[in-house]
Image (cartoon, grey):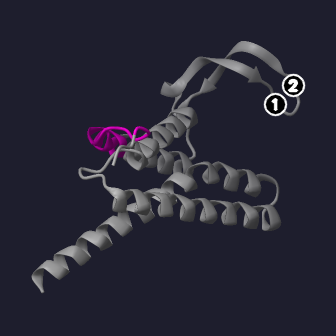
């Protein structure tokens, strides 16, 4: 089956490396709640502003880039994992990929709906931040779980 929208299979390993590195940095950032000064840099911003200061556009801002690095690692790594071809990409794999993507979308928006109804203020912001990654996260888990189950089922049938 021709799948023009998928990355080559070889991109899956670098995706895992980036994703795991993003998770490790993410746990550090979440639990230690420290921003190492090593990551203090000036970055270009399309829009900069906060609650008490006016917005400025197309400017350089001094910031700690750790959260941006974590986000890029998780998103790029997750996309490479989720949308790289399997060694043998066939209709069955495509079906599992589509079903997993639909399922992950349902779960992602169910979480968002629950958050809208039951989380407020800063807690809601945290749910939104995590919600950026849950679609990829749930897709990767479900897709790989279904692949594992199907391979395990095939091995069981071959032994019988």
The image's mark for residue 50 is 1
Q: Residue at x 46, y 38 (%)?
A: 76
The image's mark for residue 16 is none
Report the magenta residues as a range.
4-17
Label 2 CA crowd tier, 10 Å (few <14, some 14–19, many 20+): few
Is 21 rendered above or below residue 89? above
Give yes or no for residue 6 being in the magenta stretch: yes
Left or right: 81, with 52 as reference point: left
Q: Which residue is mark 2?
A: 53
| Residue 7 placement: quadrant | top left
Image x and y of residue 87, in percent: 24, 50
Q: Which residue lies most toward the front here?
A: 1
> Mark 2 to mark 1: distance in Å?
5 Å
Q: Residue at x 82, y 54 (%)?
A: 121
Image x and y of residue 160, in percent: 12, 87
Check disc 1 and report its element: helix, strand or loop. loop
Image x and y of residue 128, in percent: 69, 51
């Amino acid at each position: 089956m021709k799948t023009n929208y998928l990355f080559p299979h070889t991109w899956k390993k670098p995706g895992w490396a980036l994703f795991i590195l993003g998770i490790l940095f993410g746990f550090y950032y979440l639990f230690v709640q420290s921003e190492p000064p090593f990551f203090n840099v000036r970055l270009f911003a399309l829009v900069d502003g906060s609650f008490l200061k006016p917005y400025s556009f197309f400017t350089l801002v001094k910031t700690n880039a750790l959260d941006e690095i974590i986000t890029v690692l998780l998103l790029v790594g997750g996309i490479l994992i989720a949308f790289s071809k399997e060694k043998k990409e066939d209709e069955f794999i495509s079906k599992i990929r589509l079903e997993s993507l639909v399922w992950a979308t349902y779960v992602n928006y169910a979480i968002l709906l629950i958050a809208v109804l039951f989380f407020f203020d800063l807690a809601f912001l945290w749910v939104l931040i995590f919600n950026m990654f849950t679609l990829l996260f749930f897709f990767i888990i479900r897709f790989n779980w279904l692949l594992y189950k199907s391979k395990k089922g095939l091995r069981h049938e071959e032994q019988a």
